[in-house]
Image (cartoon, grey):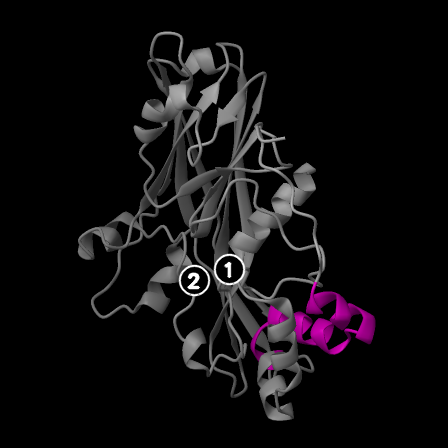
Amino acid sequence: MSDTAVERVASALLYEGYMLYPYRPSSVKNRQRFNWGVLYPEAYSRRQAGSDACEMRTECLVAGDAATALDVKVRFLHLVVRTDDGATPPWQEAEERDVTVRVDALGSLVGGSRARRFSFPASDRTEAATANAAGAVRRRQERLDGEIEIAARRSDAGPYTITVRVANRAGWAPAEGDSRDDVLPHCLVSAHTILRVEGGEFVSLLDPPDELRAAAAECRNVGTWPVLAGDDGARDTMLSSPIIIYDHPRLAPESAGDLFDGTEIDEILSLRILTLTEDEKREIRQADERARRLLERTESLDQEQMMRLHGTMRTPQPAEGQR
């Protein structure tokens, strides 16, 4: 599986739950969005007694030596609040963000850590009216500040234990009466981490070899679920997800595109989308650009594409070590 294919799986996580069928803002399911991997400002997290976290922690094992290199990429959504001069209610769109930190040698981290602060500026722009907006459209983003901290430790000649901590460092504090929708633009949304090594390999935390089960059990992950990613058997990439998935996750090749629900069956959702009324489709087009593209893609599926969604026979492969 290429790096691009791994990124496709990661992108499915990034937009998991972005909107759910029937993809209308007025539906109950879409009134509270962005429920996975949200890192809130510290002041808001304290007010919630920590139930809404301001940081996440990934801990995993790397079999390598002092010269093993590590790349850490943190990806998340930076929300955009869209309003217009017409009757369309305010809506939260999203812009993808990523920050990468490279460690040239794991040995340099032992007994210490490396931290990187990052920031994305606020913005406020107005655009002319379009066919899908009743008036001029205003899009506003709040400033985001965060920090990535990477540490490593090693006992005897065993694997390295890598710790990656991602934190929201926004200086913003909520006012009395602020709703969750007021807070989300100040959050890192759908945050997850992709780790890659050169000159070493990751150890599965779900199915570690017997001699490393104790070390794997000692890894402490908070708000994340790290799994091996890439081709079956590949061990150079770890995807730390905000939802529970298995080692070497992949997208079904028959899928025509993202439906924002990676656990659903594309055929069922596609057929349901085709039954929406014209008024419901109009609301989707006006609400969100990604939802509009989803609708147009689904409406353009031909018979052959729909048949591919109906079912595929795959030959089971023996598990590694059982061949």
Magenta part of the protein: which range? 285-311
Distance between the Cα atoms at labels 1 and 2? 8 Å
Q: Nearer the viewer, residue 31 or 124?
A: 31
Whichever of labels 1 and 2 marks the residue nearer the N terminus, that label is: 1
Crowd tier of the residue under label 1, counting other residues whose Cα lies within 10 Å: few below 14, some 14–19, many 20 or above = many
Q: Quadrant of residue 51?
A: bottom left
Q: Nearer the viewer, residue 320 or 322?
A: 322
Instruction: Specify the label residue 34 is tagged with.
Output: 2
Task: Tell me if residue 12 comes above or below residue 168 in the rendering.
Answer: below
Q: Residue at x 32, y 41 (%)?
A: 222
Residue 165 seen in the current view: yes
Q: Name the kind of residue labelled 2 in the image.
A: Phe
What x and y, as percent, mark residue 195?
52, 32
Is residue 152 depicted above or below 5 in this figure?
above
Q: Residues within 10 Å of mark 2 (few under 14, many from 20)?
A: many
Residue at 55% across, 64% down:
260
289 in the magenta segment? yes
Q: Is residue 128 visible?
A: no
203 falls in the magenta region? no
The secondary element bearing badge 2 is classed as: loop
Query: Which three-letter amino acid code belongs to the residue tagged 1?
Result: Glu
The residue drawn where x is 34% and y is 38% is: 221
Q: Secondary structure at mark 1?
A: loop
Q: Which residue in the structure is indicated by mark 1? A: 16
Magenta portion: prevailing SS class = helix
Relative to 202, is 291 on the left or the right?
right
Q: Quadrant of the N terminus?
A: top right
Residue 219 drawn at (x, y percent): 33, 30
